[in-house]
Image (tube, rainbow, N blue to C red):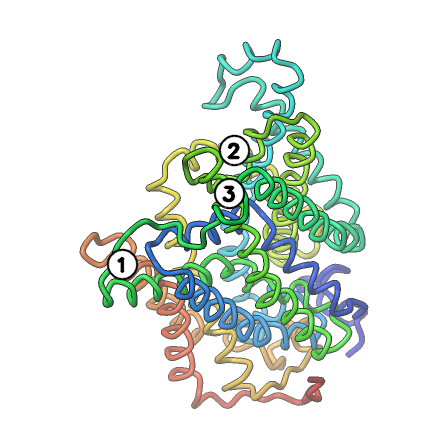
Amino acid sequence: MHKENYSPKLTNEDLAPAKKDWSWYNIFSFWMSDVHSMGGYIVAASLFALGLASWQVFVALIVGIVIVQIAANLVAKPSQVSGVPYAVIARQSFGVYGANIPALIRGLIAVSWYGIQTWLASNALMLIVLKFYPSLSPLTESSFAGLSAIGWICFGIMWILQALVFWKGMNAIKVFIDWAGPLVYVVMFALAAWLISQVGWSNISFNLGGKTLTASEQFAQTLVAIALVVSYFSGPLLNFGDFSRYGKSMKQVKKGNFWGLPFNFVFFSLITVITVSGTYSLFGKIVTDPLETVAMIDNTFAVVLGLLTVLTATIGINIVANFVSAGFDFSNIFPQKLSFRSGGMIAAIGSVLITPWNLFNSPELIHYTLDVLAAFIGPLFGILIADFYLIKKQKVEIDDLFNDKNTGAYWYKNGYNPKAIAALIPAVIVGLVLTLIPSLQHLAPFNWFIGATLGLSFYYFLAREANVKVKVAIPDQS
């Protein structure tokens, strides 16, 4: 079947197999954009405040990020060999129409986080504006829907800037993330060097917790730290097929994953801890928010450079983790009416309507959001892995991903695979129960692991007897 024979109900230019022209460096830059953000900074710093020894934190960091690397390699392959985004490769397990279920779930999650990240970036912009134009401070007093007038202005500016980068398409996004990640490193190095010059190397400590834990508590906290690392990357991990589809080969993708994950994340964490430790020595308190750290520096140029870097980093992660994925997800639901661009713009509009500043003002709600997110993403990951590696044996019929006839390999029952849906529902329910029932909430940080295991197990058990007809095997390019 040629592309012109693909069903219009299932395809458009953005969803069809893509040109594979990304090198390992482009994949490396993708992960840099994910790591070098306010969220990445705060997660890395917070691990050192759990009360663990520095070597225990680094064990947790390394184990957690290696788990992410292995999972990223597994997620990457089906999309890399077929050249299609996650929403399309999910048709292999959920059916050509059933794939709209994971696409919609993931799209709605992206809308929420897109709004939150945009609002965080707008706070950085507001700091710059008020520093240079203090006469605008009265605009912080009035509010509409929970956000001040200047807050709305800064949010609008950030919203438009991100939309412009996204609207230019994947090539513009590739260029943006290629230089955004290294730029953040330059400023992080400069900030760390400045802090060391102020307090001296002898006052930099890798133990920030100040707690005394028993051996069993240390072991439990180490497991929690590993789970936090994996949970933080769970969203971009499931989305990774949206980018690995452009990889020249699996060898290039794996190389990019190695340098972008274990190497990059641990190195970034080291710089983060030096910076946070420096703030403790200089200001008398641990400052885990890079915005607050930069704002304390008594140098206008340094403040502006630092805040602009935070803006750049936040735009980077927002585009790769939320905008791109939502674009493919919503486009997959209505391929004839929604392109990648229009799908992304729907997510951007939705991100305003949910008033993310109200969501983020409640730490409890954010805690539940993270756990609920993992409750959905874990099972979706498990089902993808079980289907591609255990049931289909790494074989995919690309043309049938776009075939809505009942002869297609992924038609199942009216375009839906009941087995995938039956595996997803109980796996998600278990994660939600762990999140919402107080006596079980100590298990909620492990939702991704539990959900991935249950999703994989349920699907494999239900689908192993199915007689799946796959006509063409894709050769291993690893």
Give the amino acid type for the residue marked by disc 3 in the picture: Gly
Which quarter of the rendering shows the C terminus?
A: bottom right
Circle 3: element type: helix
Residue at (48, 46) in percent of width and height: 203
Residue 419 at x, y percent in the picture: 42, 76
Question: Residue 411: which quarter of the image?
Answer: bottom right
Q: CA distance from mark 1 to mark 3?
A: 41 Å
Q: Which amino acid, mark 1?
A: Val
Coordinates of residue 368 in the picture (x, y in percent) = 35, 48
Can I make out residue 345 in this image?
A: yes
Q: Residues within 10 Å of mark 2 (few under 14, many from 20)?
A: some
User: Would you say the residues marked 1 and 3 are in contact, meaning their CB atoms lie under 8 Å apart?
Assistant: no
In-front residue for pair 6/25? 25
What x and y, as percent, mark residue 230? 46, 63
Q: Nearer the viewer, residue 261 or 334?
A: 261
Does residue 112 lie above or below 221 as drawn?
Answer: above
Q: Which residue is mark 3?
A: 278
Q: Quadrant of residue 393?
A: bottom right
| Mark closest to the chain's N terminus, 2 or 1 | 2
As measured in the structure, the alpha-carbon distance from the residue carrying label 2 to the one carrying label 3 is 13 Å
Q: Mark 2 falls on what kind of element?
A: helix
Q: Is residue 362 above or below residue 222?
A: above
Q: Are marks 2 and 1 in contact (CB under 8 Å)?
A: no
Q: Which residue is mark 2?
A: 292
Is 177 positioned to the left or the right of 50 in the image?
Answer: right
Q: Could you say which disc has been placed on residue 433 in the image?
A: 1
